[in-house]
Image: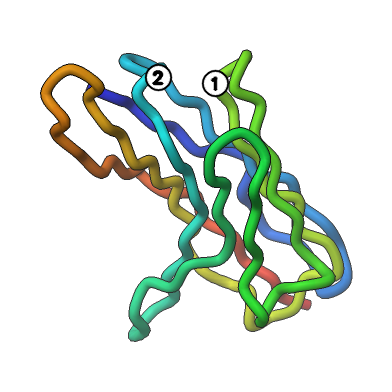
Amino acid sequence: QVQLVESGGGLVQPGESLRLSCAASGSTSSIGAMGWYRQSSGKQRELVASTIGDSTTNIADSVKGRFTVSRDNAKNMMYLQMNSLKPEDTATYYCNAFTADHITGAHAVYWGQGTQVTVSS
């Protein structure tokens, strides 16, 4: 089992910054990939950023140039640095992890509870 807890959300004005954190616990050695998703009212959940393996990162086109994702495996942490925030960034942001059992080969997907980001003047 893997537990994921997001933090760092809040209410900010356009142009300001936030740094989201995702703390992983449990069977963290089985995590092969992690990502950030977001979902706003009335819309489907979308992938914002992902980290795969030791260093590979991907950023969605909608936030490229403003958001960066990083992962610290030693501390079991993943971060999302969000700069130049816009009202359209308002959403609940979720941490995601993909695991693989090296003994059985079983895969699993885990989600955090989400943290709210609101960008408004």
Dot 1 surroundings within 10 Å: few (below 14), some, or many (20 or more)? some
Residue at coordinates 55% horizontally, 54% vertically from top-left? 50
Question: What kind of element bears circle 2?
Answer: helix
Placement of the N terminus among the 4 image quadrants? top left
* Spot occupied by residue 3 in the image (x, y as percentages of width and height): 33, 26
* Spot occupied by residue 43 in the image (x, y as percentages of width and height): 36, 84
Residue at coordinates 76% horizontally, 50% vertically from top-left? 81
Alpha carbons under labels 2 and 1: distance apart: 7 Å
Asked if the residue at tag 1 contacts the one at tag 2, i.e. Cβ–Cβ closer than 8 Å, the answer is yes
Give the mark nearest the N terminus, 2 or 1.
2
Residue position for label 1: 76
Q: Is residue 108 left or right of residue 59?
A: left
Residue at coordinates 33% horizontally, 15% vertically from top-left? 26
Instruction: Say which mark, if any, is on residue 21.
Output: none
Q: Nearer the viewer, residue 89 or 100?
A: 100
Question: What kind of element bears circle 1?
Answer: loop
Q: Nearer the viewer, residue 5 or 29?
A: 29
The kind of residue tagged 2 is Thr
In the picture shown, does residue 92 fall above or below 104?
below
The kind of residue tagged 1 is Asn
Dot 2 surroundings within 10 Å: few (below 14), some, or many (20 or more)? some
Q: Is residue 17 left or right of residue 54?
A: right
* Spot occupied by residue 111 in the image (x, y as percentages of width and height): 32, 44
Residue at coordinates 78% horizontally, 77% vertically from top-left? 121
Q: Nearer the viewer, residue 120 or 54?
A: 54
Residue position for label 2: 28
* Spot occupied by residue 47 in the image (x, y as percentages of width and height): 48, 67
